[in-house]
Image: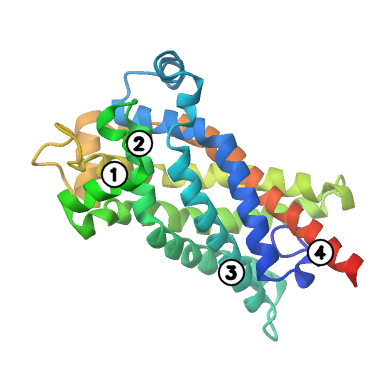
Amino acid sequence: MSNSVDRTSHSSVTGPHEKLAASVVGGVLTALATNPFDIVTRRVQAGGAHTSAVTIARNIIRSEGTLGLWRGLGPTLLLTVPGTAFYFTAYSMIRETVAQRPGMSDRAVTVWVPLLAGPCARAATVVAVAPLELVRTNVQAFARDAAVDDGTYRMLQSIVRTQGIRGLTTGLVPTLWRDAPFSAIYWFLLEHGSDALSRSQWSGASSTFANNFIAGAGAGVVAACCTHPFDVAKTQRQMNLAIRPGAVGTNAPTKLVPILRQIVAERGFRGLFLGAGPRIAKVAPACAVMISSYSFFLERFAQTHTAVV
């Protein structure tokens, strides 16, 4: 049986609070480790295909200092703590509930739970944290500027003032198109990848962390490649907010399909994969760190329970 997520023996002795704590710790560690990749991805997507990711990273360090690579970390952490906690806890609880139903085979669990629970949990999370995702994208996409450097709360105020309450959901549709399929692909591959690794010759009791790390990275890369055009569309849509002078033209498209068409018309089909390199470079370690640290802390909590009992 796979060691991924809740398919371990320690799952049965950890409750919602332990799952919540494990997901929060894992999310914070992931955000700290991968924020620079997010910054570079947004700048590549904002600036087009004429500047390489390496050049952009160097320019950020030169003009904004090394800490510029962690720009937008505040909104990212505000996103990570509630978002990741809700997402992983919801997926874990749904998975446990389905897996414990009478007559439910392991095969059925590994096929249907990822394809259904993953997107459902992720979609609910995306809707809940949409305003913070909007702020983070705008902060990361532009260099340090007084017009966009007033903080999360003031940027939210500006969006509501210029766009209304509905402005806080700008980019929600492409975000859902990116994240819901991503979750289905990711969890499906993670379940099967972890299961295959746990049955391999090199796997043992001490390799649970490594199994989750490898399976998480691989699943994240495939899912990111499949859904990247929607990430480009999301960034484009959220950058089209008129929250700073000259930020957007009056004819900027607002619907997903027209945005994708505009990207192709202006940059070719390659434009749909702008920033794919740094995003994949971020997603691979992010997924690996998140799932392995989540499982690691769940195991520690389970051991604490066992010791107390």
Quick one: label 2, few (<14), some, or many (20+) residues within 10 Å? many
Query: Which amino acid does the dot numbered 2 rest on?
Result: Val
**Tag 1 secondary structure:** helix
Q: Dot 4: few (<14), some (14–19), or many (≥20) neighbours within 10 Å?
A: many
Q: How far across and how far down the image is residue 180, in percent?
A: 44, 58
Tag 2 and tag 1, C-beta contact below 8 Å:
yes
Q: With respect to residue 141, does 212 lie above or below?
A: below
Upstream in sequence: badge 1 or badge 4: 1
- Please name which of the two marks, 1 or 3, marks the residue nearer to the observer: 1
Disc number at residue 139? 2
- The residue under label 4 is 302
Comparing marks 1 and 4, which lies closer to the viewer?
Answer: 1
In this rendering, the label closer to the viewer, 2 or 1: 1
Give the spatial CA distance, label 1 vs label 4. 42 Å
Residue 142: x and y, percent?
32, 29
Q: Do the residues labelled 1 and 4 touch (CB within 8 Å)?
A: no
Provide the residue designation for mark 3.
113
Q: Which amino acid is tagged 3?
A: Val
> In the shown orientation, is residue 297 left or right of residue 114?
right
If you read the primary sequence from the N terminus, does the residue marked by circle 2 or circle 1 appear first? 2
Q: Which residue is drawn at 49% across and 25% down?
A: 67
